[in-house]
Image (cartoon, rainbow, N blue to C red):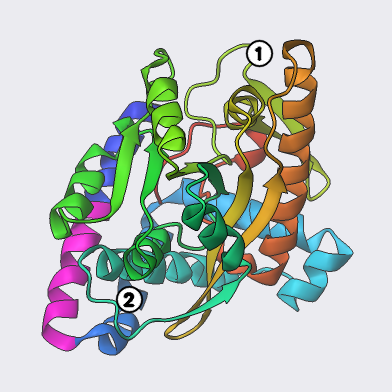
């Protein structure tokens, strides 16, 4: 049996091969032809990763078990729909690479609520951008470059060090700074506070547990099933008292994305005795919002692991 760490290493190597193939194809043939040729890559991951197939089917079946999910999917999930889910992830990887290397002039961005983020940046009020592995959080790099924003992203880099290095080399001048997260150190918290004090934005993806620790998780209903979410991002907001926005970027067409910014938590420090309760409430509200946007774009949920069992995530 492959250990979690060994599986992650194998998956990362597979993803690196796919990324290098995508980059070569993109350089030679352009984006539209590259997208057409992504199906073999998606099929490779579909055929070789039983774990990602199971996770995709479980997610789609969970959606199908709800009335709203049936309307979003249209028909009961079959193998083709699981392959489609993997294909959508391949498009995400290609566009992530394109965005990182700064060759994204062909991408059209529609904005839904981005004025909230722009206003905070103008007023130099630091804020947390609460994201998820839903759509492309990397589009923040493009938005920050186009609008002169300084964005810092908290990232647990241990499980994707090679891939993160690959993307960083594509554009060393990116206006997005990565804050390396170490769950056993408070250094990243001080770095986050410094960024917020300078009036910068800090992006945090709050839908995954990287290293479960007692007292640092919260159970939230997600499509009718209990899911474990990290409590840390929400405790951070109650501690630092900064405004928090839900921030997502979802694909709405072949060359079109929608950037979503939605006020989530107001500024204000929460008294110590009330922080855990408030953080739990925020986590549950976050899960509810994720349901809403999963129903809008059901195939852009890129958590290819047993989300409801709180498994350590890996790439497909």
Q: Position of residue 277 (x, y in %)?
A: 80, 22
Q: Are marks 1 and 2 in contact (CB under 8 Å)?
A: no
Q: Which mark is residue 215?
A: 1
Tell me the magenta residue range: 15-29
Answer left or right for 176 relative to 25. right
Q: Between residues 39 and 195, which one lies in front from this camera angle?
A: 195
Question: Which image quadrant for residue 37?
Answer: bottom left
Q: Between residues 240 and 20, which one lies in front from this camera angle?
A: 240
Q: Secondary structure at mark 1?
A: loop
Residue picked out by circle 2: 38
Which residue is depicted at the point 88% across and 66% down? 67
**How far is the residue under mark 1 from the one under mark 2?**
42 Å
Q: Earlier in the sequence, mark 1 or mark 2?
A: 2
Task: Indicate whether 9 appears above or below 246.
Answer: above
Q: Secondary structure at mark 2?
A: helix
Q: Position of residue 49 (x, y in %)?
A: 41, 51
Answer left or right for 286 relative to 137. right
């Amino acid at each position: 049996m492959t250990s979690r760490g060994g599986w992650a290493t194998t998956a990362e190597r597979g993803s690196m091969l796919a990324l290098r193939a995508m980059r070569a194809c993109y350089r030679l043939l352009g984006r539209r032809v590259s997208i057409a040729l992504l199906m073999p890559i998606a099929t490779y991951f579909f055929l070789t990763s039983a774990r990602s197939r199971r996770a995709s089917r479980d997610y789609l079946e969970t959606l199908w078990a709800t009335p709203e999910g049936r309307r979003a999917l249209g028909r009961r999930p079959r193998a083709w729909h699981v392959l489609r889910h993997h294909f959508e992830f391949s498009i995400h990887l290609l566009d992530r690479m394109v965005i990182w290397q700064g060759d994204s002039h062909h991408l059209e961005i529609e904005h839904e609520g981005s004025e909230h983020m722009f206003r905070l940046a103008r007023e130099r009020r630091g804020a947390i951008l609460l994201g998820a592995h839903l759509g492309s959080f990397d589009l923040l790099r493009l938005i920050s470059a186009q609008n002169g924003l300084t964005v810092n992203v908290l990232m647990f880099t241990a499980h994707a060090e090679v891939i993160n290095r690959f993307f960083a080399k594509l554009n060393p001048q990116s206006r997005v700074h990565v804050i390396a997260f170490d769950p056993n150190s408070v250094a990243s918290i001080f770095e986050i506070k410094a960024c917020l004090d300078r009036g910068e934005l800090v992006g945090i993806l709050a839908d995954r547990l990287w290293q479960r620790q007692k007292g640092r998780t919260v159970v939230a209903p997600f499509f009718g099933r209990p899911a474990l979410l990290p409590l840390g991002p929400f405790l951070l907001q109650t501690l630092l008292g900064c405004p928090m926005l839900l921030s997502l970027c979802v694909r709405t067409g072949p060359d079109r994305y929608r950037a979503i910014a939605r006020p989530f938590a107001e500024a204000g420090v929460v008294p110590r005795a009330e922080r855990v309760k408030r953080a739990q409430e925020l986590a549950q509200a976050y899960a509810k919002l994720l349901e809403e946007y999963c129903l809008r774009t059901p195939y852009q949920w890129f958590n290819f692991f047993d989300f409801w069992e709180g498994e350590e995530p890996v790439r497909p």
